[in-house]
Image (spheres, rainbow, N blue to C red):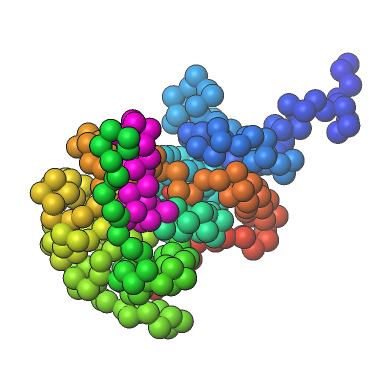
Amino acid sequence: MGVSNTDSDKTQEEEQQDLPKVVLFRPPAAFSLIDEESFTSNKFHFLKTYDSQLPVDQFLSTHSHSIKAILSSAGAPVNADILQLLPEVGLVVTTSAGLNHIDIPECRRRGIKIANAGHVYSDDVADLAVGLLIDVLRKVSASDRYVRQGLWADKGNYPLGSKLRGKRTGIVGLGNIGYEVAKRLEAFGCFVSYNSRKKKPYVSYPFYHNVCELAANCDVLIICCGLSDETRHMINKQVLSALGKEGVIVNIGRGNIIDEKEMVSCLMRGEIAGAGLDVFENEPDVPKEFFAMDNVVLSPHRAVFTPESLKDLSQLVVGNLEAFLSNKPLLSEYVDKK
Ligand SMILES: O=CC(=O)O
């Protein structure tokens, strides 16, 4: 007769079998940027659909009763079809600040909580937003190329850029990130106004209910809001025309908030002056037209990531999952906006 293992005799694999499972459908970008180990815990075990030979639905049915939570990221949608296969799931954690890849109404209908990256990225994104703006205005990347190509000596000085101080800047979306951008721009001597779903009682910046009116009264628009049905292509031809030919647009939100085709046309026709873009409609594909434009600064959707923000993120993700599994309050629960 065999002797059953005591707890202390269990292999690591057997111990992991007993832990609550957190499922992943795609490796979050963060996993390849810092050590994946920093997202692990002895309170849960990751199940990765992408490590299995089984079709996803079969994999989920096999494990459906042990999967208590989902770890998602901007490229890994959590939709009704997936949730339906996971009756025990009570939490979706995403490594992103944005939630546009999660079917929030379906989570609510199923009583599933959601936690996102909270404030961990706000400083870094805000820094990059201002960095992109300064780069466009002062032509930092373009003049760097000029010097490297040896054109300074051949052709003389690069054309002047434009001053940041005194610019009328419009923040679209005054959440955590938008507020951090506003504080930085104030310190640079810019005038700040904003558009949001609602006027914020805690700031005295002028509020524009209508984004087109905001654009008409600003030299710069900085897109800091999330992507939703209401904000998709909110920055359209009309808004870009209102911003005008001296106007600069910066986008650190989501590509689809701007009608990208219209933005390309406006830039080509000189109907706006420049753009600083961290996000695009069909990432990683970027409209080729931008490559020849020295008044456009491009960044590969990296505004949120620094080694420091990733370390904070890993602690937050693990903290949220552990809190949920021990019935404690989440560290960065997403609460629906009224
Ligand atoms: O874009 C990145 C994020 O939403 O975290």
Residue drawn where x is 87% and y is 17% of the image: 2
Q: Position of residue 57 (x, y in %)?
A: 44, 31
Residue drawn where x is 33% and y is 30% of the image: 149
Q: Position of residue 336 (x, y in %)?
A: 43, 66
233 relative to 283 in the view: left or right: left
The image quadrant of residue 67 is top right
| Residue 252 shows in the view | no
Q: Position of residue 62 (x, y in %)?
A: 54, 30
Prevailing secondary structure class for the magenta stretch in the rendered image? helix
Q: Position of residue 315 (x, y in %)?
A: 66, 50
Viewport quadrant of the C terminus: bottom left
Magenta region includes residue 262: no
The stretch of residues the image draws in magenta is 131-151
Residue 57, placed above or below residue 87:
above
Q: Nearer the viewer, residue 40 or 55?
A: 40
Extreme residue toward the top, this view: 1
The image quadrant of residue 271 is bottom left
| Residue 333 shows in the view | yes
Q: Nearer the viewer, residue 98 or 90?
A: 98
